């Protein structure tokens, strides 16, 4: 009787190991199949088109800054309309920080410098705040874990975390002014402050546990140049407001426009993923299915998920494809892969349903 029990338990353990191996093999096979299909079908789409980048960013900046000037000068009613236009246009321009962190800079020479001059420094979100951080989010062994700077299991957290997560974004413009006008100069004098600034206040991240490492080499030189430039701008801005060179209304309009853009981006972040991972490493397929595409025919994503962000799941599958080619990549994959393919399971019709899904998930007792 004893030997029979032992034999049964040994057989059960073997079955469990076999089942585990089978599940792992299936995940690996799914990953390879999807990655192979995606790579084969989009091989000719990897090269960025410089004229698209320059034209898109330049037009967005002209509309954004022009509308901001109008919002400052027009009566209240029209000022609100102009302010919204400015917020959307500058939000689009700011979203190019995502492309700056991905493209090979030799493919679009001078674009990173141009982006920093026309949008990064004036909005106090220079590219070093994202470069060297966002790539960690794409690391296959980090995605969805505690080491991912851009991931929180929001769907598994308390209901109040969602509105707080969004509302905190409205404070971003003031926080960035404090970071560059106050803490940056202090950090040059006090090493402990510098350590705090580098680790905690130098990354556009949502994971409060993330600690950034100090840059080295060329990245350090770029970081310092952009930080000094942004700090000088922030100090000059505050000084001009205090000296009444810039009217208070103009300054508040500036802050309000960027607060609106920050909130829109935070809402977009809410639906960029399903946020359902509890910290374990995920397969490529699992990472893809935890991410979100909001493809056509809907047109509103052009406003709240610009510069290719409506194809966020596809971007995680093919991070090297430039934003202007993601629509074509999605069309090819949608046509080539059957309806039972995992590829189609990451597509959703729009923003409201995704927000409702997230909020409902937080209300489930755990």
Image (cartoon, rainbow, N blue to C red):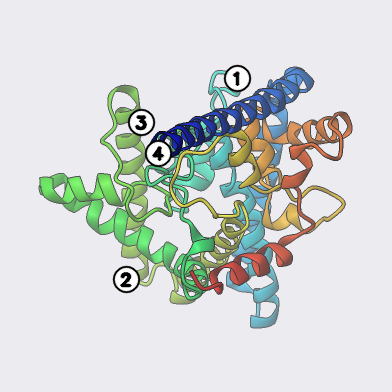
For mark 1, does the 10 Å Cα neighbourhood hold few (<14), some (14 to 19), or many (20 or more) residues? few
Q: Is residue 58 visible?
A: no
Relative to residue 76, is residue 40 drawn left or right?
A: right
- Mark carried by residue 107: 1
Distance between the alpha carbons at the discs numbered 3 and 2: 30 Å
Q: Position of residue 275 (x, y in %)?
A: 55, 55
Q: Secondary structure at mark 1?
A: loop
Q: Secondary structure at mark 2?
A: helix
Task: Tell me what residue is drawn at x 58 percent, y 40 percent.
Answer: 287
Front of the two marks 4 and 2: 4
Q: Position of residue 163 (x, y in %)?
A: 52, 73
**Dot 1 or dot 2, earlier in sequence:** 1
Distance between the alpha carbons at the discs numbered 4 and 2: 29 Å
Q: Secondary structure at mark 4?
A: helix
- Mark carried by residue 128: 4
Distance between the alpha carbons at the discs numbered 1 and 2: 43 Å
Relative to residue 83, is residue 117 drawn left or right?
A: left
Q: Nearer the viewer, residue 359 or 92?
A: 359
Front of the two marks 3 and 2: 3
Of all residues, the one furthest to the bottom in this rendering is 76
Task: Establish if 63 lies above or below 249.
Answer: above
Task: Establish if 321 lies above or below 8.
Answer: above
Check if mark 3's residue and mark 4's residue have beta carbons within 8 Å.
yes
Task: Tell me what residue is drawn at x 60 percent, y 40 percent.
Answer: 286
Q: Nearer the viewer, residue 269 or 101?
A: 269
Disc 3 marks which residue? 222
């Amino acid at each position: 009787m004893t030997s029979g029990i032992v034999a049964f338990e040994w057989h059960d353990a073997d079955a469990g190991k076999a089942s585990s191996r089978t599940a792992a093999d299936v995940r690996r096979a799914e990953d390879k199949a999807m990655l192979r299909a995606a790579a084969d079908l989009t091989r000719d789409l990897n090269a960025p088109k410089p004229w698209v980048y320059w034209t898109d960013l330049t037009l967005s900046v002209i509309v954004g800054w022009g509308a901001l000037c109008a919002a400052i000068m027009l009566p209240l009613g029209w000022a609100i309309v102009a302010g919204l236009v400015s917020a959307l246009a500058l939000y689009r321009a700011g979203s190019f920080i995502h492309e700056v962190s991905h493209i090979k800079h030799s493919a679009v020479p001078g674009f990173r410098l141009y982006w920093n001059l026309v949008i990064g420094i004036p909005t106090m979100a220079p590219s070093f705040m994202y470069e060297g951080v966002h790539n960690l989010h794409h690391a296959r062994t980090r995605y969805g874990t505690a080491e991912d700077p851009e991931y929180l299991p929001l769907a598994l957290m308390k209901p109040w975390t969602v509105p707080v997560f969004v509302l905190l974004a409205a404070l971003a413009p003031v926080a960035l002014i404090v970071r560059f006008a106050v803490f940056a100069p202090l950090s040059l004098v006090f090493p402990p402050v510098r350590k705090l600034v580098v680790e905690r206040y130098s990354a556009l991240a949502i994971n409060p546990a993330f600690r950034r490492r100090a840059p080295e080499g060329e990245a350090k030189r770029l970081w310092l140049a952009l930080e000094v430039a942004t700090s000088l701008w922030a100090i000059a801005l505050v000084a001009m407001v205090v000296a009444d060179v810039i009217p208070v209304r103009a300054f508040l309009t500036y802050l309000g426009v960027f607060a609106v853009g920050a909130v829109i981006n935070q809402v977009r972040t809410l639906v960029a993923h399903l946020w359902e991972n509890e910290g374990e490493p995920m397969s490529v397929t699992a990472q893809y299915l935890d991410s979100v595409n909001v493809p056509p025919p809907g047109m509103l994503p052009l406003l709240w998920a610009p510069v290719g962000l409506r194809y966020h799941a596809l971007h995680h599958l093919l991070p090297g494809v430039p934003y202007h080619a993601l629509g074509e990549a999605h069309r090819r994959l949608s046509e080539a892969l059957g309806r039972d393919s995992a590829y189609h399971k990451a597509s959703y019709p729009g923003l409201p349903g995704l927000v409702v899904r997230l909020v409902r998930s937080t209300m489930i007792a755990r």
